[in-house]
Image (tube, rainbow, N blue to C red):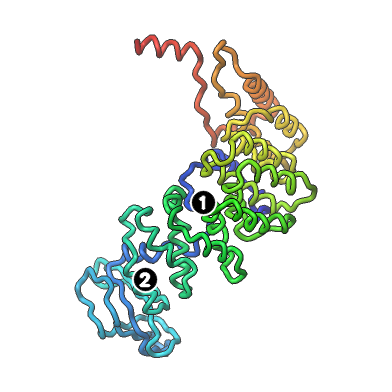
Amino acid sequence: MTVRCLLAITATGIISAVGLTSAWACPGCTPTASETRAETVARSDVVLLVQFVNSRPQDGENPAQTEYQIALVGKDATGTFSPKEKIVLNNYREADPGDLYFLNGLQNKEETIDWEAPVEITETGYHYVMQAPSPERPRHERLPYFVKFLEFPDTFIANDAYNEFAFAPFDDVVTLIDILPRQKIRKWIDDAETPQSRIGLYGIMLGLCGKPEDADLLGEKFFEKADQYVFGMEGIVTGYLFLTRADGLHKIEQKILDTQDKSVDFLYPLMRAFRIVWTYGGDRVPKSALIRTMRRFLEHDRLDELVIPDLARWQDWEPVDLLIQKYDANPGKKHESLKRAIIIYMLECSQQDFNDNGSLPPSAVKAEAFLDRVKQEDPVLLKKVRRFYRVEPRKSPESDLSKQTTDD
């Protein structure tokens, strides 16, 4: 999805952005399938390695058919299949006799098997799948098996091993730091033959297991092309910042954000990388520095509404005056998505806790005054936002004191 599509964000989309959690599997990765092969095996009643025998296309009322012969039985909860047995599926496939396929199915109410589409596979690929650890085991215990199959010569295996990491929570990947193949990862990142969809994962991995000098490899991937999108850029920038920390963030500001006319399609992945570092980077990059850098995207008219929810989630109330100015400078229906984002920000800002002296922070006072004004000037828009978005009401000092007295 391009940034141009994302700029059509709805009110619910903005609300979802405010509510992002750290349960995001492999930030910067794009799985190439809806599940891994180990998961396919786990949910299937029957898993077979079959050989293509012959096929025939549909002929009048005679349906198309393809005949296979079972070579190996990997799983059979029904106890009814054995090697050399023939299986006929009602579809047509062109192949050479002896070609191997991964075939799986589930038993239905009639106790017959609903077969899924056969997948071409090698015998090596089949054994890789059947020897893979069960998804019932904790993922951090399973991932070491798949590390050695990343960029395996067999494409089927390499794709599946990548997907295991693409679906893995970040915290599980971190446990592998000591066994990640640093030199191989460097080679994969620098190899033009590496599928672009995997570069983001390898960028993050190198950031976790790499040495300071590895930052140069990652940095050249986007600094030298700082006017166009680089595949896997979110992961590359994340890995770069994991290695360079605050110094790397400052360099990005100087070389990229301080320059003019950068492509939106380039800047948006950069923004996403900062989100990843905020959520998963621990103390590698100071939160205050990330906040300061993220504010820079408010300067861009096509990215401002996308960064506002981040600032609200990070409780950065410093730009409250700037956002009020933006709201006033963008009247009318045309800018409604930006205005919704600002209203949500102000709702969050207005709910800050009281100071020790019982007064509200100045930014909260400004946010409340802004919301009172919007209620008078555009009650329909405010009502529309409130319909989808709720904030926890602020506790007053009196309620806290009352609760303390009750507990005593």
Residue at the limit of the structure toward the left, as seen here: 79
Where residue 305 sits: x, y (%)?
Answer: 67, 41
Q: Nearer the viewer, residue 10 or 204?
A: 204
For badge 1, the amino acid type reads Leu
| Residue drawn at the location 62% of the way across and 19% of the way down | 361
Q: Which residue is mark 2?
A: 128
User: Residue 402 is drawn in which quadrant?
Assistant: top left
Residue 295 shown left or right of residue 287 in the figure: right
Q: Residues within 10 Å of mark 1 (few under 14, many from 20)?
A: many
How many angstroms separate mark 2 from mark 1 (CA)? 27 Å
Q: Mark 2 or mark 1, which is nearer to you?
A: 1
30 lies above or below 261: below
Q: Quadrant of the N terminus?
A: bottom right
Position of residue 376 relative to residue 313, above or below, is: above
Position above or below: 98 against 393: below
Identify the element where label 1 is drawn. helix
Picture residue at 42% right of the left edge, 62% below the top: 35
Q: Position of residue 186 (x, y in %)?
A: 56, 62
Say whether residue 158 is left or right of residue 200. Answer: left
Relative to the observer, which residue lies in front, 111 or 19? 19
Left or right for 404, reference 389: left
Which label belongs to residue 50?
none
- Which residue is label 1 attached to? 208
Q: Position of residue 214 (x, y in %)?
A: 59, 55
What's the amino acid at mark 2? Tyr
Q: Residue furthest right?
A: 260
Which of 91 and 60 lies nearest the eye of the viewer?
A: 91
Residue 365 drawn at (x, y percent): 64, 19
Which is more N-terminal, label 1 or label 2?
A: 2
The C terminus is located in which quarter?
top left
- The residue drawn where x is 40% and y is 14% is 403
